[in-house]
Amino acid sequence: MNRWTRYAGVALLLVLQSAPFARAETPEEKGLAIAVKADQADSGWGDQTSNMTMILRNRNGDESIRKIRSKALEVKGDGDKSLTIFDEPKDVQGTAFLSFTHSHKPDDQWLYLPALKRVKRISSKNKSGPFMGSEFAFEDLTSQEVDRYTYKWLRDEELDGKPVYVIERRPSYKHSGYTRQVAWVDKNILRPVKIDFYDRKDSLLKTLTIKDYKQYKDKFWRPGTMDMVNHQTGKSTTLTFSDYQFGSGLSDRDFDRNALKRAR
C-alpha cells in the first residue's frame, strides 16, 4: 500500500508537516501544497519489509486469519513497487501480489495463484475490486503518488482529543471505485488516523482507522494496526504489522514477474 501509509506497498495516505502554508491561497492550493510536502517528508526510505496478520470478519463477526509478508521498493520519478506474499492458511499459501504504481499511467498489478501455477494480470478496470476477500481494494494497495489526485484542504479540528488536519482528495486516474477520500491527520505525528472512502455514488463506503504508530530511522512513521470497516456490507478487515525492516538491499529483480513464482 499507500505514501499515506506504507505497508506491503499498501499505500495508503497523507503525511503532513506542521509548517504554515503561507503561499497557499485557496483550499485547493493549500491541499496540494500539503500533499507535496507530505511526499517529501516520507522520501528516502529505500526499501522496506514487514510481517502482517490479516483478520477478516463477516457481518456476523466470524473471523478468518491470514499471515502475510511484504516487501516494498522506493522508485525515484515514479510510483513504488511492492510484493505481498501469503504464508497461511494453507489454502492461500504461496499466493503473491505484485504492484507497480505509476504517476501518469495505469498501475501494473499481477496476482500469482499457486493452485493454478499461473500469473494473472489485474485489469485496470478491476482495481476497485476486493483484494483476497478483504475490505481493502486493489487500488488501496499502491503508493499514493501526488499526481494521481486533486486535493482540497477542508478544515482543522480535533479528533479523539488530538488536533488534526482534514483533507479531501479525488482520484484523477480512471476506473477508481471512489469519488473522493477524506483524511484526518494527527498534527503531532503528522500521519493519518482516519480515512473515509466514498463510492461512485458519493455515499460513504468504508472507514479506515490507523493506530499504534512507531517511528523508524528517526524519520519514518509506520502503523501497528489498520482497521477497514465497510459500512454498506457490515464486513471488516484488520491488519496488524510487525518486524519493520529498512535497507535490506532489495532491488528491481526482487520485484519482477518471476519474483511472484519464486515467492515462498
Image (tube, rainbow, N blue to C red):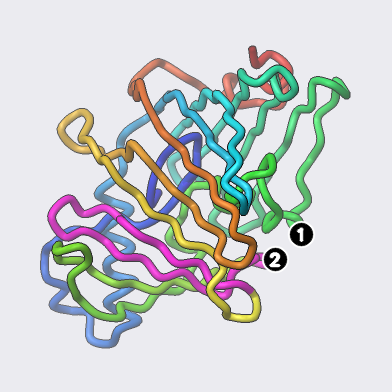
Type of amino acid under label 1: Lys
Q: Residue sitting at 62 percent across and 45 percent down?
A: 134
Q: Is residue 16 above or below residue 167?
A: above
Most foreground residue, 33 or 199: 199
Where does the C terminus fall, quadrant-wise? Answer: top right
The answer to which quarter of the image holds residue 20 is: bottom left
Q: Residue sitting at 31 percent across and 61 percent down?
A: 36
The disc placed on residue 68 is none
State the extent of the magenta-drawn residues as a range.
174-199
Q: Is residue 25 above or below residue 6?
A: below
Disc 1 from disc 2: Cα separation? 5 Å
> Circle 1 sits on which residue?
125
Q: Residue sitting at 73 percent across and 34 percent down?
A: 111
Q: Is residue 229 magenta?
A: no
Most foreground residue, 100 or 211: 211
Check disc 2 and report its element: helix, strand or loop: loop
Check disc 1 and report its element: helix, strand or loop: helix
Q: Is residue 136 above or below residue 66?
A: below
> Circle 2 sits on which residue?
175
* Residue 45 location (% of width, % of height): 32, 33
Q: Is residue 193 visible?
A: yes
The answer to which quarter of the image holds residue 29 is: bottom left
* Residue 64 location (% of width, % of height): 61, 33
Q: Is residue 198 magenta?
A: yes
Query: Do tag 1 and tag 2 residues touch (Cβ < 8 Å)?
Result: yes
* Residue 91 location (% of width, % of height): 75, 22
Which residue is the extreme one toward the bottom?
26
Q: Residue sitting at 16 percent across and 73 percent down?
A: 21
Most foreground residue, 229 or 136: 229
- Residue 132 appears left or right of 254: right
How many labels sit on residues?
A: 2
